[in-house]
Amino acid sequence: MTDLTHFDSEGRSRMVNVGGKPLTERTATAEGFVVARPETMARIVGGGTAKGDVREVARLAGIMAAKKTGELIPLCHPLGLDAIEIDFSLASPTQLRIVATASLTARTGVEMEALTAVSIAALTVYDMCKSADKGMTIGPIRLLSKTGGKSGDWHADHE
């Protein structure tokens, strides 16, 4: 289990000690999708729901979630983010694409914050529209890229 940093040599859970690592600029971008019926997606994009502008509420939820990632993921360091941006685009008449980019200067990366932002934004879209379309699906959710840190930059094969 030595290649999994959140376990010690005996397989016990641990929070990685990042105290000796240098501060570096770091970013991470993640994406996720919500799939819904075309008429539901039209309402999401057009802002026509009884609960308000779905994308703006989901954006706020994603930002709030990114800031609380260290409280939600057991071994994740609590981080003071410099920025978190969440954007929405229509990938198809039935697919809403959510992209989150988190950035900071720190001793550890922000991949979990970007992934959490996308996840909670997608769940918020579902929550706000479930009365009209309980058959919506969420996913896939994945990391698109990360920069900074000891391991350097990384980009997904298919962005």
Image: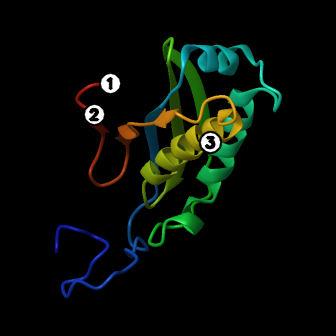
State the residue at coordinates (74%, 36%).
57
Rounded to the nearest whole Å, what is the CA distance between mark 3 and mark 2? Answer: 22 Å
Q: Is residue 132 above or below residue 21?
A: above
Q: Indicate the colouring scheme.
A: rainbow
Q: Sort mark 2 into few (<14), some (14-19) or many (20+) by Cα contacts within 10 Å.
A: few
Query: Residue 150 in the image: x percent, y percent?
Result: 29, 55
Q: Where, quadrant-wise, is the N terminus in this rendering?
A: bottom left
State the residue at coordinates (35%, 52%).
149
State the residue at coordinates (48%, 72%).
74
Q: Is residue 53 above or below residue 46?
A: below
Q: Quadrant of residue 80?
A: bottom right
Name the element at disc 1: loop
Q: Count the labels in the image.
A: 3
Q: Which residue is denoted by mark 1 in the rendering?
A: 159
- State which mark lies toward you, 3 or 1: 1
> The disc labelled 1 sits on which kind of residue?
Glu
Name the element at disc 2: loop
Q: Sort mark 1 into few (<14), some (14-19) or many (20+) by Cα contacts within 10 Å.
A: few
Rounded to the nearest whole Å, what is the CA distance between mark 3 and mark 1? Answer: 22 Å
> The disc labelled 2 sits on which kind of residue?
Ala
Judging depth in this view, the residue of 121 and 5 nearest the camera is 121
State the residue at coordinates (83%, 28%).
50
Q: Which residue is denoted by mark 2 in the rendering?
A: 156
Judging depth in this view, the residue of 1 and 83 nearest the camera is 1
In the rendered structure, the answer to whether residue 125 lies left or right of residue 10 reads: right
In the rendered structure, the answer to whether residue 47 lies left or right of residue 30 reads: right
Mark 3 or 1 closer to N-term?
3
Q: Which residue is denoted by mark 3 in the rendering?
A: 83
Q: Which mark is residue 128?
A: none
> The disc labelled 3 sits on which kind of residue?
Ala
Name the element at disc 3: strand
